[in-house]
């Protein structure tokens, strides 16, 4: 009935005030992020790690890989980094690429550089998939607890109570030992490890998301969306979620670091990815027997884990600073 | 046009005995210690194309009334009759039909727009509800809406943080208009704005009413604004309507002691004229403490024992003029000049 006719009617109003120069959120984000040198360093190392893991996957897999991480040369065992191979004792196909053992060899004469490349991919996928699983569960559970939390299930138990008590129960278990138990019962495979790490680390995200939903749910723009008649589903995913995602992103970045650490720890204890597949954890674990004869076997994977985990943490903290609206106002 | 004037007499919204009590929880077990009577039996009507002003001090339940009518909160008792249907008991699914006919403009221009959505997307949410599936058509409509509220069409792909308070309020109005509502509830739409911007927004609202035949429930604590914009005014205090009258009559002949003191509190532009407040300088008494009788007791200068002993009722004192005070009904309030 209210037929809106704008044309006859807009001359009444001057378009007040010129608009501020257009700057997208990404541009603003980048301007702020650039100022944080450590975070930039973290991002840089992260990209480097990502690329080397990706390239490493191609170079170390297949029937005749460029770098063969499983090739055993017993006559060349425990060679130090940058050692030249003894060409006279090797078959032509056993000669390492680049004619040098970049990171030395282990107790079976396997090229540590090739094994590190293969292990990088394991660390990367474990980190991302495990965190992906935990973030998905966390957002789902936290979203329900925050948005539908007031609904009563049975008498006095609300949805919120139920979900948050599950979170509390999960947090009661020392998670590393929980993972150890589960991994000991399940067949050892990289996928099981990803899933188990994911399923035991979603509680933090759930709490974050719930807290964000609780405060965002009371905001006027959500009330406006409700008044318009927007569906609950759309309110959750289009209106609230984009506003709640920032802390999740930050905790996910730091979560990747801790997932990589967990995987390395599991492999070190012998519960991780089964040999002959190399991971940084099991290179480290094998190397510990030769720590005085061949220290590079422990130091190379150890330092690699340190650098990657540190860079993720630095990047995550930089992200948190930038996404914090209070800092944004100052910028 | 004839049908329009016919409909002008029709009542678009009637609220009857609306109540909302919030529990006050105390102690370790969160036992309900008392009830905060935020809205305690409010009744009024809004006629098609007219504006009802709801005035009162902070915390008197104005915003709760707005949220109850929109069913953003469930009411505890009472009827909300919108275009002949009682919507107060409707389930959310059935409510969908009426949602788009009633919209709200919020007080806070900063919290009322989604910071992660462009202005265009925010307004298009309404157009989607209206069922405009075709994207170019939505775009066209969006530009019209922006022009209607005096914004340039280029603002559509910008984010709310790039706009000033007044501009955001216009965007909020455009969003409310996007579903072609019949009634807009304005919850203190100008109280967060500059005085100069206030005038622009009020004129915009007035103009939109003339053009689109909208009805408003205009909530404010600023009597000047309400007097300029509204046809009838309801004065609210502690969850009850104290006085209900056509605007001119309320300003010329206020009857309730509370209304009188509110009017007296309007600052006089003349220097040297200090307002006579008629109110003891006391804060709003805690409404969770149950009292008997008139809810204005404790602050009223004309209080007598009868005020504490007898339930108050809304008494008619003139044509469409009602007052909740036995003294006013018996004409025992001394005139203030």
Image (cartoon, coloured by chain):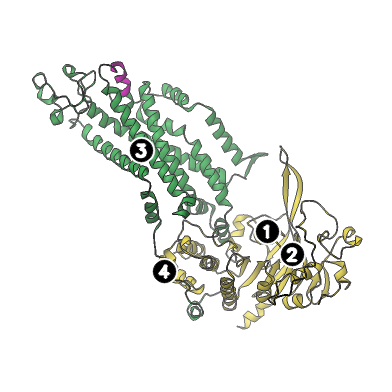
Chain colours: A green, B yellow
Query: Do marks 2 and 1 both belong to one polypeptide chain?
Result: yes
Q: Is residue A318 magenta?
A: no
**Position of residue B321 in the picture relative to residue A244 (left or right):** right
Which residue in the structure is indicated by mark 3? A311
Q: Look at the image and give the residue range highlighted in magenta.
A: A284-290
At a point 22% along the width and 32% down the height, the residue shown is: A60
How would you rate the neighbour count of disc 1 (Cα within 10 Å): few for under 14, some for 14-19, many for 20 or more?
many
At a point 72% along the width and 44% down the height, the residue shown is: B25
Report x, y in % for residue A152: 64, 42
Q: Name the disc covering residue B154, or none.
A: 4
- Distance from Cα at disc 1 to Cα at disc 4: 36 Å
Instruction: Report the mark closest to the observer, 3 or 2.
Output: 3
- Distance from Cα at disc 1 to Cα at disc 3: 50 Å
Which residue in the structure is indicated by mark 1? B64
Chain of residue at mark 1: B
How would you rate the neighbour count of disc 4 (Cα within 10 Å): few for under 14, some for 14-19, many for 20 or more?
few
Instruction: Report the mark closest to the observer, 2 or 1.
Output: 2
Query: Do marks 1 and 3 both belong to one polypeptide chain?
Result: no
Query: Do marks 2 and 4 both belong to one polypeptide chain?
Result: yes
Q: Name the disc covering residue B236, or none.
A: 2
CB within 8 Å, label 1 to label 3: no
At a point 43% along the width and 34% down the height, the residue shown is: A198
Chain of residue at mark 2: B
Q: Earlier in the sequence, mark 1 or mark 4?
A: 1
Query: Do marks 1 and 4 both belong to one polypeptide chain?
Result: yes
């Amino acid at each position: 009935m209210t037929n809106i006719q704008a044309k006859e009617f807009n001359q009444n109003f001057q378009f007040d005030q010129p608009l501020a120069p257009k700057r997208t959120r990404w541009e603003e984000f980048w301007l702020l992020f650039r100022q944080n040198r450590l975070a930039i360093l973290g991002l840089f190392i992260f990209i480097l790690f990502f690329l080397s893991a990706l390239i490493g996957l191609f170079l170390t897999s297949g029937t005749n890989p460029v770098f063969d991480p499983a090739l055993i040369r017993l006559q060349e065992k425990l060679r130090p980094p940058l050692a030249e191979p003894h060409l006279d004792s090797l078959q032509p196909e056993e000669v390492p690429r680049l004619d040098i053992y970049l990171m030395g060899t282990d107790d079976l004469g396997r090229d540590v550089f090739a094994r590190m490349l293969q292990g990088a991919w394991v660390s990367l996928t474990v980190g991302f998939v495990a965190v992906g699983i935990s973030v998905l569960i966390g957002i789902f559970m936290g979203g329900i607890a925050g948005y539908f939390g007031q609904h009563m299930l049975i008498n006095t138990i609300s949805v919120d109570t139920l979900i948050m008590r599950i979170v509390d129960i999960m947090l009661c278990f020392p998670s590393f030992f929980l993972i150890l138990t589960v991994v000991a019962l399940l067949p050892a495979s990289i996928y099981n490890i990803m899933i188990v790490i994911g399923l035991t680390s979603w509680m933090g995200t759930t709490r974050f998301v719930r807290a964000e939903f609780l405060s965002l749910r009371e905001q006027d723009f959500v009330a406006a969306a409700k008044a318009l008649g927007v569906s609950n589903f759309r309110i959750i995913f289009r209106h609230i979620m984009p506003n709640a995602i920032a802390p999740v992103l930050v905790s996910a970045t730091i979560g990747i670091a801790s997932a990589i650490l967990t995987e390395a720890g599991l492999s070190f204890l012998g519960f991780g990815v089964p040999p002959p597949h190399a991971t940084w954890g099991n290179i480290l674990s094998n190397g510990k027997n030769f720590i005085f004869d061949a220290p590079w076997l422990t130091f190379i994977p150890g330092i690699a884990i340190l650098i990657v985990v540190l860079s993720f943490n630095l990047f995550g903290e930089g992200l948190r600073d930038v996404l914090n609206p209070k800092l944004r106002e100052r910028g | 046009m004839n049908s329009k004037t016919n409909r002008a007499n029709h009542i678009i919204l009637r609220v009857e005995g609306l109540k909302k009590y919030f529990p006050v929880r105390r102690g370790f077990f969160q036992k309900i210690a008392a009830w905060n009577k935020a809205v305690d039996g409010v009744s009024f009507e809004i006629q098609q194309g007219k504006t009802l002003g709801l005035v009162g001090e902070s915390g008197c339940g104005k915003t709760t009334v707005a949220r109850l009518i929109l069913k953003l909160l469930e009411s505890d008792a009472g009827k909300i009759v919108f275009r002949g249907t009682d919507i107060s008991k409707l389930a959310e699914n059935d409510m969908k039909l009426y949602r788009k006919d009633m919209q709200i403009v919020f007080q806070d221009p900063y919290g009322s727009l989604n910071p992660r959505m462009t202005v265009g997307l925010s307004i298009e949410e309404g157009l989607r509800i209206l069922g405009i599936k075709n994207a170019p058509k939505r775009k066209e409509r969006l530009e019209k809406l922006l022009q209607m509220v005096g914004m340039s069409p280029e603002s559509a792909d910008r984010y709310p943080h790039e706009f000033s308070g007044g501009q955001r309020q216009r965007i909020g109005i455009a969003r409310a208009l996007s579903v072609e509502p019949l009634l807009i509830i304005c919850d203190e739409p100008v109280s967060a704005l500059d005085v100069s911007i206030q005038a622009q927004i009020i004129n915009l609202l007035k103009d939109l009413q003339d053009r689109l035949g909208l009805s408003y429930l205009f909530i404010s604590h600023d009597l000047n604004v309400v007097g300029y914009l509204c046809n009838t005014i309801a004065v609210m205090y502690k969850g009850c309507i104290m006085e209900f009258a056509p605007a001119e009559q309320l300003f010329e002949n206020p009857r309730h002691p509370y209304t009188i003191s509110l009017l007296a509190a309007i600052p006089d532009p003349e220097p040297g004229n200090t307002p006579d407040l008629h109110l003891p300088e006391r804060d709003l008494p805690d409404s969770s403490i149950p009292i008997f009788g008139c809810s204005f007791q404790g602050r009223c200068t004309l209080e007598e024992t009868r005020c504490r002993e007898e339930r108050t009722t809304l008494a008619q004192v003139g044509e469409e003029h009602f007052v909740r005070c036995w003294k006013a009904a018996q004409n025992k309030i001394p005139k203030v000049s």
